[in-house]
Image (cartoon, rainbow, N blue to C red):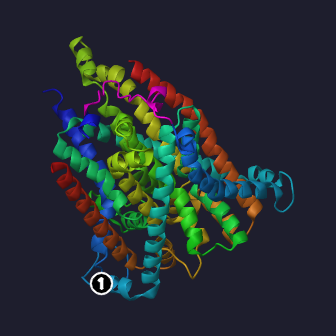
Amino acid sequence: MRLAPFRILLGLFCLLVAVWLVMPTLVIIPMSFNEKKSLAFPPSGFSWQWYENFFTNPDWLSSFFNSLRVAGLVAVAATLIGTLAALGLSRMKHSGAGLLRAILITPMIVPGVVLAIGIYAVYLDYQLVGTTTGFVIAHTMLAIPFVIIAVSASLEVFDVRLETAAASLGADRFTAFRTVTLPLIAPGILSGLLFAFVTSFDEIIVALFITSPYLKTLPVQIFTSITRDADPTVTAVGTIIFIATTLIISAGLIISSKSTRS
Amino acid sequence: MSQTSHTPTAGGDHPRPSGAVQGPQPRLRLATYPSLLAMPALLLLIAAMGYPLLTVTLRSFSDPAWGLQNYVWFFSTPVNVTVLLRTFSIAAWVTIVCVIAAYPYAYLMTAVGPRLRLVLILCVLVPFWVSGVVRTLAWVILLQDSGIINSVIRLFGFDGVKLIRTQTGVVIGMAQVLLPFMILPLYSVMRGIDLRLVQAARSLGARPARAFLQIYLPLSLPGVFAGAIIVFILSLGFYITPALLGGPRSTMLSTLVQSQVLSLLNWGRGGAMGVVLLVATFVLLALAAPLMRQRHKQASRS
């Protein structure tokens, strides 16, 4: 085959790209067991001290729980508001739907810092800096586009005639929605929920501006500890997040493969 | 569920509900005005994005006094113009690197078996499993002077390269973060390309390179455009990666905005910079949108 050398080259190139994609994630894990307080690679020795530090240091723990609380509230709020919007958009017939969709998705494109200084300015006026309410409002706005996209994708393949069929069998609109539409678009809503949670849990730029010593989220704590000193606790946190995500995703895959089999 | 899977997917275009579906008499106002369902989202957007952006814009014209002085200052200070141009050039480099890395990768995703494809997709998704800030720290570890990349380079007998606190380092880090946004749209376009067209060209005597350039490449361009625009626009607003990986000579506009507002408390100048960034983003988007739509039409026509 004349194409063989080309294929090998393609394979090697893609291997390099894959390594480039994955390496930063994997390099964090060995670093988290470092014995010394340094970020030099390769790490030397073995210790659990950075994990210990994470679980005992009140700064790290409180920021972690703050992030969980904010992200949980954001996930619920954004999923609710975003799903409603996606349903409305899918039912709109005139040309306004495209424009409205474009407007609702703009938070994804607006440069983070510009949004952050604006929100900071407004929050200073309304005493929302460093409050859970402030975080939830800002993050919900940022998360809604992801919910709309996820739910719209599952509405795209949803056959509207099913709802009409339910209506023709005597179901009122709400019953038809609850018993037919909702179960069918549930995977989209669920992935929207996850995206919303992650968006908030991972958000840093707006958080850096509206944070206060009394309310820090985990990314803010990570950022300040990176810029202040080379604290390897960050790598322990990164490893914990990585393992937690892997477990959640594997569980999701197992559940979904079981439900499709049955 | 089975009904939905039986709907013909020939055009890939599901017919939107037309007037005929509206058969049952709408009892609820929500049914007649579905846009009402989007109102909560729109109101939140106006409160949490529209109002803040309006505030920034107003301050850029009114702080400390009404007028254009902040914009005059911005464009007449050489440092700012340098940073503005640098922001665009870094974004362009990141986009180019992403296109070069993503194109073969997305192609391979369409060409391999399902098992290897899963591995390739996992490689794209794994970066998302760790928080963005942590990933940037990982790049600090990798790029530092005693880091892995420099060790590998020295292993081959070359001199170490200065990567951290340089523009190259920033581009490497940013491109890795943004690569999935390039790979995924490219993959979805490439998956839809009918490979029989390439075979037809080959059977008519075209050499592989020519068949690729004349058939495959033009058909995959919508994916390249879509990905490139997303990557470029997202890079313009990058803040964390340049702040941690870059040095004073690779500052991007976002960092300047931040320091004007937080360190110098100069809302007018910071706001003016923010507005410049915002306008650049939307002008690009407005320029790119019709281009993307046109390419899409061409692709679906052929």
**Is residue A256 toward the left or the right of residue B187 in the image?**
left
Asked whether residue B229 is in view, the answer is: no
Query: Label 1 neighbourhood size at 10 Å, few (<14), some (14-19), many (20+)?
Result: some
**Is residue B271 toward the left or the right of residue A223 in the image?**
right
Residue at image coords 34%, 70%? A241
Residue at image coords 43%, 77%? A64
**Residue A48 in which image quadrant:** bottom left
Residue B9 on the magenta segment:
yes
Rendering coords of residue B100 (x, y %): 38, 40
**Is residue B131 toward the left or the right of residue A259 in the image?**
right
Asked whether residue A143 is in view, the answer is: yes
Whether B32 is drawn above or below A106: the answer is above
Report the residue that reaches farthest toward the left: A1
Q: For mark 1, name the chain.
A: A
| Type of amino acid under label 1 | Glu
Question: Which residue is labeled 1 in the image?
Answer: A35
Whether B269 is drawn above or below B290: the answer is below
Please name whichever residue, B39 or B44, is drawn nearer the observer in this view of the structure. B39
Report the residue that reaches farthest toward the front: A170
**Residue B172 in which image quadrant:** bottom left
- The quadrant of the image that shows the C terminus of chain B is top left
Q: Secondary structure at mark 1?
A: loop
Residue at image coords 45%, 63%? A76
Prevalent SS, magenta region: loop
Rendering coords of residue B64 (x, y %): 84, 63
Please name whichever residue, B65 or B81, is drawn nearer the observer in this view of the structure. B65
Magenta residues span B6-25
Rendering coords of residue A131 (x, y %): 59, 75
